Amino acid sequence: MDGEALTVADASFDAAFSIFGVMLFSDWRRGLREQARVVRPGGKACVATWAEPPGGGPFVVMGAALRSVFPDLKPPAMPAGMLALCDAGRLSAEMSAAGLGSIEVHRFEGIWRGGVGDAYFEDTEALHGYMQPYAALNQADRERVRAAIRTIIAERCVGETVEFRTLVLLAIGYRI
């Protein structure tokens, strides 16, 4: 369903969650308003965002790999919602503007774990399609980036697992 135009009635749910989603919407404010709209009065709306671009786990790895293979490549602009909502004060203010109150924002460390070697690519290949600089590459350049990813993962693995820690904001508000 389109998060900017939910096809459900007002006040349909006791709670609504956006876990690393609304921050990526082209009209993220509309997404926040839609989230608030579908929650019943007194119900909860929760939004999780990265506290720092580019996000967590695979996004950090892809950025590092692209920089190592293409040092002159200018990184793409971060989505406007990601830049706005990575600040706790702004996240709270935007949720309030969307119709939520009693907002609390919690900061914590998120941990992303994945496999190493081929298992890493099996876990993350679908995400890579959303990473525009990688998606735009020809097959030979993708292989160069994949080799850089393997190196990065090998340097960070413990046994058969790689782990990345990233700061996360979790905001909880109540429908007014």
Image (cartoon, grey):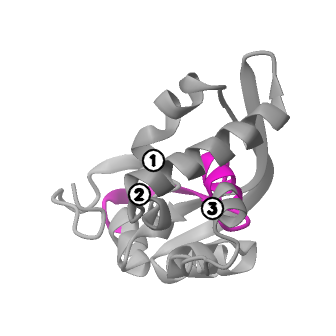
Label placed on residue 142: none
Q: Quadrant of residue 149?
A: top right
The answer to whether 24 is drawn above or below residue 18 in the figure is: below
Q: Amino acid at mark 1?
A: Leu
Q: Is 62 inside the magenta-drawn segment?
A: yes
Front residue of this view, candidates 92 and 4: 4
Q: Is residue 100 left or right of residue 28?
A: right
> Which residue carries the number 1 mark?
127
Does residue 62 appear anywhere in the picture?
yes
Q: For marks 2 and 3, give the CA distance.
A: 14 Å
The percent coordinates of residue 157 (x first, y second) are: 80, 28
What is the total number of numbered labels drawn onto the structure image?
3
The percent coordinates of residue 63 (x first, y second) are: 65, 61
Question: Which residues make up the magenta segment?
Answer: 37-64
Q: Quadrant of the N terminus?
A: bottom left
The answer to whether marks 1 and 2 mark residues whose Cβ atoms lie closer than 8 Å is: yes
> Which residue carries the number 3 mark?
66
Name the residue located 57 percent from the left edge and 71 percent from the top edge: 101
Q: Quadrant of residue 162?
A: top right
Name the residue located 65 percent from the left edge and 74 percent from the top edge: 92
The answer to whether marks 1 and 3 mark residues whose Cβ atoms lie closer than 8 Å is: no
Q: Amino acid at mark 2?
A: Tyr
The answer to whether 32 is drawn above or below residue 142 in the figure is: below
Q: Is residue 130 left or right of residue 34?
A: right
Which numbered disc flags the more N-terminal residue, 2 or 3?
A: 3
Which numbered disc flags the more N-terminal residue, 1 or 3?
A: 3
The local crowd at label 3, few if under 14, some if 14 to 19, many if 20 or more residues have their Cα within 10 Å, is many
Does residue 44 appear anywhere in the picture?
no
The percent coordinates of residue 125 (x first, y second) are: 44, 40
> Which residue carries the number 2 mark?
130
Of the two numbered discs 2 and 3 in the rendering, the one whose residue sits closer to the viewer: 3
Name the residue located 42 percent from the left edge and 62 percent from the top edge: 137
